[in-house]
Image (cartoon, rainbow, N blue to C red):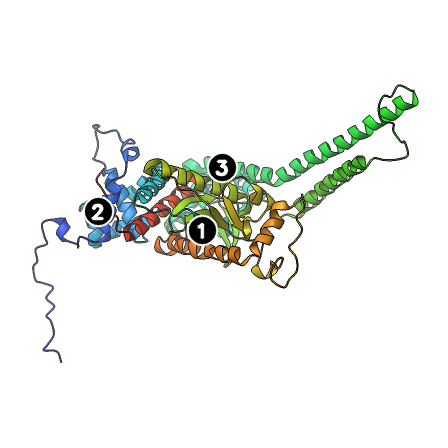
Amino acid sequence: MAKGFKAVDRDQGFLLPVDMRDWLPADHLVWFVIEVIESLDLSAFRGRYRLGRAGREAFDPVMMVTLLAYAYCRGLRSSRGIERACLTDVAFRIVCGQRRPDHTVIARFRAGHEGALSDLFAQVLVVCGRAGMGQVDLVAIDGTKIAANAALDRSRDLAWYRKHAAAFLKEASQVDEAEDAAEAAAGEPADPLLRDPSGRRERIRQVLEEFNNRQANQTQPVVEAEARARQARADYEALVAARQAGIQAQRQGNHIGRSFDPDLVPKRHQAALRRAERAEKFVTTLRERLTRQSPVRVNQTDPQSKIMKTRQGWVQGYNCQIAVSADGLILVAQATTQATDNAQFIPIMTKAVEAVDLINTTTGQSRQIRTVLADAGYYSEANLAAPGPDRIIAAGKAHNITANNPGTGKPRPINERNTASTAMINRLSDPDTATLYKRRSALIEPINAHLKDRRGLRVFARRGQPAAHSELRFAAAITNLMRLRNTGYQPQPA
């Protein structure tokens, strides 16, 4: 039974502690973030400023980096949200020292220091390595789709852009008036492509350049296949010409060496002819596929983003590749514009090896990646046979891999055309290898969830592949920093 109610007197005057360190307990997250950021080399941020000139004082870049880092730790990425938190949240007020930056200052700082914020990932990775993190004997690689700051239905084909570009060049002044009216009525211009009058020409140029790049990428496989077909046909014709010359010399009595049988076509000639015919048939197949493909579409808000398929449907965004160690340390984080994962395996594996070398260089250790785990999206003969650490790549769904399982018969025979693929299928049939591969999802999926849910990185704040890549690496650095805190690490002053 309660004696009564505690009084709530909002008119009571209070005196906050004079020292900010008395505002929050010593083990609060904000103190850890401040100490870690101040221990890093932030000269790249300070180097962009020229001090001693006329004008207002700039906010300390160290404070701004700390503010962004703590905001990402809290899953807050909106510049307006950070500005509000600097007014209402005690921890944010401690970070900025009671100096509340405007949301435009925060947004411009993030945009102006894009490269430096991305480079913090390597510094945090080194700090984590020195603290003992980085069990790299096992590394998992995976891709996750993150939406761009652009609407899916803003993707248009080339004809639409040419039509609007011509309309702009002809009637720019009328478009300006229409935008002003739309902005006054709805709060923003109706057409994001033409939102900034001073940047319309540049935006249209970027879009048309992106069209050219994507169309070149579409036709590049056909061009390469045609070159291979021409070479195969030329090799066959050279064999035929050499044989005909030998037969002619033999008839004239000038031939020296093995005699030719005019009625017998050598097997190597037959094999060369088959290779040429297969190559030419493949070219025809690629051309037919190209004619069936839908026309290239480029998003008018973020031209570099692409339409990608996810489990929840289609998204306008980027394919973000992550490599994670056995203890959850992010070694690589890269935002790509390729919708599929297959072509990313070798680059990401190479970057993971470079990240481990960086940790070894700074810590004096000799860690090495022993095994790389990847799902079926990375499965190909080239990825399996490429030089580098040992790897286990799923060949498909588990119930489809039946070779070499108990009671299913003998292993698949290995031939010269798919040596690595057949060996991997046989290897996945081994229970110990299958058990090791099962660790992949437990390593990589929680990290993807942390980036999207804990860091709030479901939609990129800024547009363009470089901006998305920078934000992804910064969010990955903060995720590593949070894991570092769980180890009990104590930062040392720079």
Q: Which residue is mark 1?
A: 146
Work out whether mark 1 precedes mark 3 in sequence or the reverse, and give the earlier one. 1
Q: Which residue is mark 3?
A: 206
Work out whether mark 3 precedes mark 2 in sequence or the reverse, and give the earlier one. 2
The residue that appears at 87% across and 29% down in the rendered structure is: 260
Q: Amino acid at mark 3?
A: Gln
- Mark 3 to mark 2 CA distance (whole Å): 39 Å
Work out whether mark 2 precedes mark 1 in sequence or the reverse, and give the earlier one. 2
> Circle 2 sits in a helix, a strand or a loop, which is it?
helix
Q: Of the residues tagged 3 and 2, which is closer to the observer?
A: 2
Q: Nearer the viewer, residue 384 or 433?
A: 433
Q: Quadrant of residue 123?
A: top left
- In the image, which disc is placed on residue 95? 2
Disc 1 and disc 3 in contact, CB within 8 angstroms = no
- Mark 1 to mark 3 CA distance (whole Å): 22 Å
- Asked whether the viewer can see residue 102, the reply is no
> Circle 3 sits in a helix, a strand or a loop, which is it?
helix
Apparent side of residue 18 relative to residue 42 in the rendered image (left or right): left
